[in-house]
Image (cartoon, rainbow, N blue to C red):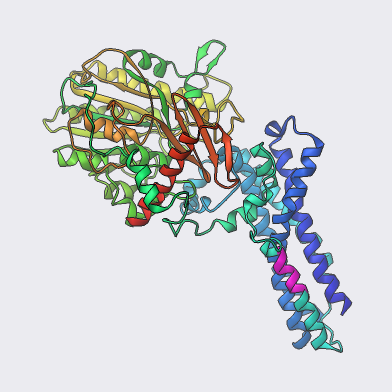
């Protein structure tokens, strides 16, 4: 009897120990971010993280507990039971080690612990792995193997404690094990308080990195699977009547109360080229190395065209940035509407709006548009012709993501000139890709691989635009350069701050009526669609979330989301809210916080009703 009880106690304690081990491993792996943290803070990370560590241990110990009860009534040789347990613990070890290894690396790019979002990208594993460099893959594989081996080795000693021999008083022992099950239930539940186990229970510091370090990655992943199916109730900040009233004051499609929109175009029907620039963050654009600008072309275009000084990305991922730019629809926190074809096809769409006006619409990408369901989403939202890696067949090598920007921008440059020779107006889009991890480009301008790749993409886009400038097509072109999202540069910049989401947007082309102009208005990607359509004098009344930047009667603010939180920025300051922690990260202006709450809640209410 004692050996069965000791076995279960050993399994639970070992599992907790293996979960605790993740904390110092995480802090060591992200040593640059953890620099300056004290030993006391490390201890607090471990202590506060114990709650979720024990929850995970409870789940993992639950099946061995049930099998132990079965062993009292089903006589099997010890060797058979031990094989069953070893197989179970080997599987658990590999799963836990995989989550730990993947989470350690993902945090570098995402700035939050692994959650259900990762499944969106694992639906296309080949494309997801394209972001991983060779050294990263080797390093994380070694961590996986070492961590799994340690767990398997530890569990072997626990399994040796188990015995399947018959005992007297099986009923009483079964009762004792059921009582032990009650303690496991409390561990799984997170204690006896009203609040059950959740990530916010381990948050203890105003330093979000320390809170993230205390979070158990396996719990973070499992607890968010299937999140947001109850879209209307995902973020219940306000009662529905109040939410609707608050959103009425923010929406971009509400009737204008007067005032003239600034007119920037010589003609209301120019040919439109939309260049979505992978990871072109404002901090990277402004970076210099030994006095050399990382993006000299973007800096030059900033001086030549219409420059939007206070412009923000709505998210941190391409799929969400594309929806914000092309549909005027806000990014979500832990999901991607692009992955919901039944809902994404109902969104308003810049391509669809222009197609109704007789525009031919086409989009080009040097990689695979099947990744995150981009192809089906784009066709469903009005893009008539898609050209991507499988269609290009260029005489050039491919990177892990696809063709590099130099050959794709050359092809796309020719395509725009070809389209311009036609009498049919067009909307042509391009998503660049070389400035994406693993940042492998045929260029060695800077030692830093990220800056080097960004510089390469900048040069490729610059050459393409200069070709258009030298052609008759330029006279009727409106070229819009906008990033899909930013990049965490300088390295270690917090993922939820406004600076992390600041991006460039520049309008160029002979279709512009005015010369260089700086627009100081605060706005974000969702405002682009309504702004373009307003300039072209096309109805945009179906874009509830998109505001015409140049309409003086509409509220002016930039809005973005991150993993379970939001940020709002305007001329008065910034407000950043972490929904998991239930508190402000930055700012104190209640008006800005209410704007963010209204936007986030309204986004999910809208999704639920589509």
Q: Position of residue 338 (x, y in %)?
A: 38, 49
Tell me which residue sits at (16%, 32%) in the image.
Answer: 425
Q: Give percent across and percent down for residue 16.
A: 77, 58
Name the spot of residue 256 as percent of width and height, x first: 23, 33
Q: Is residue 60 visible?
A: no
Quadrant hosting residue 318: top left
> Residue at 51% across / 12% down in the picture?
292
Q: Work out whether residue 167 or residue 121 is closer to the camera in this orientation and state it.
A: 167
Q: Quadrant of the N terminus?
A: bottom right
The residue furthest top is 291
Which of the image's four quarters has the C terminus? Answer: bottom left
Identify whether 182 is placed above or below 401: below
What is the x, y in percent for residue 17?
79, 55
Provide the residue span drawn in magenta: 180-187
Instruction: Name above or below for residue 522 compared with residue 133.
Output: above
Q: Is residue 590 left or right of residue 386?
A: right
Q: Is residue 348 above or below residue 451?
A: below
Name the dominant secondary structure of the magenta segment.
helix
The total number of labels drawn is: 0
Does the image show residue 321? Answer: yes
Q: Nearer the viewer, residue 112 or 201?
A: 201
Q: Residue furthest left?
A: 423
Q: Quadrant of residue 265?
A: top left
Q: Is residue 486 magenta?
A: no
Q: Along the line of sight, which residue is nearer the eye, 263 or 10?
A: 263
**186 magenta-colored:** yes
């Amino acid at each position: 009897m004692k050996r069965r009880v000791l076995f279960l106690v050993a399994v639970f304690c070992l599992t907790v120990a293996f979960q605790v081990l993740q904390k110092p491993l995480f802090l060591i792996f992200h040593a640059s971010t953890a620099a300056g943290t004290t030993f006391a803070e490390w201890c607090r990370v471990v202590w506060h993280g114990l709650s979720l560590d024990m929850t995970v241990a409870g789940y993992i110990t639950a099946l061995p507990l049930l099998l132990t009860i079965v062993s009292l009534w089903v006589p099997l040789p010890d060797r058979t039971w031990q094989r069953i347990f070893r197989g179970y613990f080997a599987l658990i070890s590999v799963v836990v080690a995989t989550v730990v290894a993947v989470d350690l690396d993902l945090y570098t790019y995402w700035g939050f612990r692994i959650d259900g979002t990762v499944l969106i990208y694992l639906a296309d594993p080949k494309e997801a792995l394209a972001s991983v460099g060779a050294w990263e893959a080797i390093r994380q594989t070694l961590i996986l193997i070492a961590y799994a081996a340690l767990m398997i080795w530890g569990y072997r000693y626990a399994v040796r404690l188990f015995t399947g021999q018959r005992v007297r008083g099986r009923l009483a022992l079964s009762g004792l094990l059921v009582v032990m099950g009650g303690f496991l239930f409390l561990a799984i539940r997170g204690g006896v308080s009203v609040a059950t186990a959740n990530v916010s229970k381990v948050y203890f510091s105003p330093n979000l990195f320390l809170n993230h370090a205390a979070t158990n990655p396996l719990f973070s992943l499992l607890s968010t699977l299937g999140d947001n199916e109850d879209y209307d109730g995902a973020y219940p900040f306000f009662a529905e009547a109040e939410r609707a009233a608050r959103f009425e004051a923010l929406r971009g499609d509400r009737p204008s109360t007067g005032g003239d929109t600034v007119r920037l175009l010589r003609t209301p029907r120019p040919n439109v080229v939309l260049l979505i620039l992978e990871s072109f963050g404002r901090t990277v654009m402004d970076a210099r190395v030994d006095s050399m600008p990382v993006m000299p072309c973007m800096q030059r275009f900033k001086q030549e065209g219409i420059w939007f000084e206070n412009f923000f990305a709505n998210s941190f991922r391409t799929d969400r940035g594309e929806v914000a730019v092309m549909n005027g629809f806000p990014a979500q926190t832990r999901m991607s509407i692009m992955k919901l074809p039944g809902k994404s096809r109902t969104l308003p769409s810049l391509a669809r709006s222009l197609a109704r006006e007789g525009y031919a619409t086409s989009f080009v990408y040097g990689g695979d548009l099947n990744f995150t369901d981009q192809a089906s989403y784009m066709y469903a939202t009005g893009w008539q012709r898609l050209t991507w890696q499988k269609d290009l067949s260029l005489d050039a090598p491919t990177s892990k993501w696809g063709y590099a920007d130099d050959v794709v921008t050359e092809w796309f440059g020719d395509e725009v000139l070809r389209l311009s020779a036609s009498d049919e107006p067009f909307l042509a889009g391009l998503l660049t890709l070389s400035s994406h991890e693993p940042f492998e480009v045929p260029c060695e301008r800077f030692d830093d691989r990220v800056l080097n790749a960004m510089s390469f993409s900048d040069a490729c886009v610059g050459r393409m635009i200069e070709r258009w400038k030298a052609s008759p097509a330029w006279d009727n072109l409106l070229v819009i350069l906008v990033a899909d999202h930013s990049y965490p540069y300088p390295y270690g910049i917090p993922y939820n701050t406004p600076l992390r989401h600041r991006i460039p947007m520049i309008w160029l082309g002979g279709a512009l009526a005015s010369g260089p102009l700086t627009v100081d208005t605060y706005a974000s990607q969702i405002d682009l669609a309504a702004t373009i359509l307003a300039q072209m004098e096309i109805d945009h009344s179906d874009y509830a979330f998109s505001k015409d930047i140049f309409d003086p009667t509409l509220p002016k603010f930039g809005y973005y989301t991150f993993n379970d939180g939001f940020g709002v920025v305007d001329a008065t300051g910034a407000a950043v809210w972490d929904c998991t922690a239930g508190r402000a990260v930055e700012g104190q202006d209640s008006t800005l916080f209410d704007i963010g709450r209204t936007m986030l809640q309204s986004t999910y209410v809208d999704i639920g009703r589509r």
